[in-house]
Image (cartoon, grey):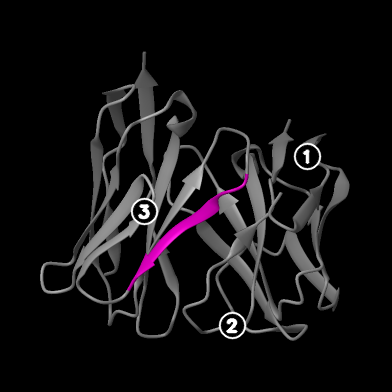
Amino acid sequence: ETGVTQTPRHLVMGMTNKKSLKCEQHLGHNAMYWYKQSAKKPLELMFVYSLEERVENNSVPSRFSPECPNSSHLFLHLHTLQPEDSALYLCASSMRYGENTEAFFGQGTRLTVV
Amino acid sequence: GQNIDQPTEMTATEGAIVQINCTYQTSGFNGLFWYQQHAGEAPTFLSYNVLDGLEEKGRFSSFLSRSKGYSYLLLKELQMKDSASYLCAALDSNYQLIWGAGTKLIIKP
């Protein structure tokens, strides 16, 4: 148990569906992250929020839309995904953004797009 | 460009010692992390090195050479539960984490 909880653990969705991934942390951390993990590839940073403000501008397709309503919760809204978006989506948090503090990860959502 | 290299897979025997290497090329450097990730689980923090040398933490040790852009994770007295992927990640000058693809460690009895 890392203190970061993600739901759902598994998700199968069609290319026309709309779904959302949820992440929750009660560690008092100020920074939250979404990563994509594909087999045998490095973790890809998708989005970063610091104090509820989006701070990274990585080139992520608009079919992925993040939302951070407060410092404890982070969402990833999905719509019209492609099969190549199938991957493990990991949420993480850290004490502060832009420092050498360790990240705490959730167990991830295994997403399959059919 | 920025890059992390680590072996894709390694096999070792229970009770033995294994060393997982990681080389990095980054724009600036603010330290290197090692994480452990069991299949289907969250990556969990193992170690952080920013100064040259060896840091020991129980059965696990991590080494860093900044001049060589090189780190290794040393696992002693291997146990079956050590079967996992080990992720190396370097912090660049902007404190962005550059990740390796991970090393899958298989422990055999």
Q: Residues within 10 Å of mark 2 (few under 14, many from 20)?
A: many
Q: Quadrant of residue B31?
A: bottom left
Judge from the rendering whether residue A77 lies leftward or rightward of residue A45; answer left or right: right
Q: Which residue is mark 1?
A: A9
Q: Which residue is mark 2?
A: A97
Query: In the rendered image, is residue B24 in sight?
Result: yes
Q: Which residues are magenta?
A: B42-49
Instruction: Give the structural element (helix, strand or loop) at label 3.
Output: loop
Percent of width and height locating residue A44: 51, 58
Residue name at image x 55 percent, y 69 percent:
A59
Judge from the rendering whether residue B64 lies leftward or rightward of residue B77; answer left or right: left
Instruction: Give the structural element (helix, strand or loop) at label 1.
Output: loop
Q: Quadrant of residue A74?
A: bottom right
Q: Which residue is mark 3?
A: B100
Percent of width and height locating residue B18: 25, 36
**Vertically, is A100 above or below A107?**
below
Q: Are marks 1 and 3 in contact (CB under 8 Å)?
A: no
Percent of width and height locating residue B94: 42, 85
Which chain does the residue under circle 1 lie in?
A
| Mark 1 or mark 2: whose residue is earlier in sequence | 1
Q: Which amino acid, mark 3?
A: Gly
Residue name at image x 39 percent, y 45 percent:
B102
Q: Which amino acid, mark 1?
A: Arg
Which chain does the residue under circle 3 lie in?
B
Between A13 and A55, the one nearer to me in the picture: A55
How far apart marks 1 and 3 lie (CA) works out to 24 Å
Q: Are marks 1 and 2 in contact (CB under 8 Å)?
A: no
Between A68 and A96, the one nearer to me in the picture: A96
Query: In the rendered image, is residue A79 in sight?
Result: no
Q: Are marks 2 and 3 in contact (CB under 8 Å)?
A: no
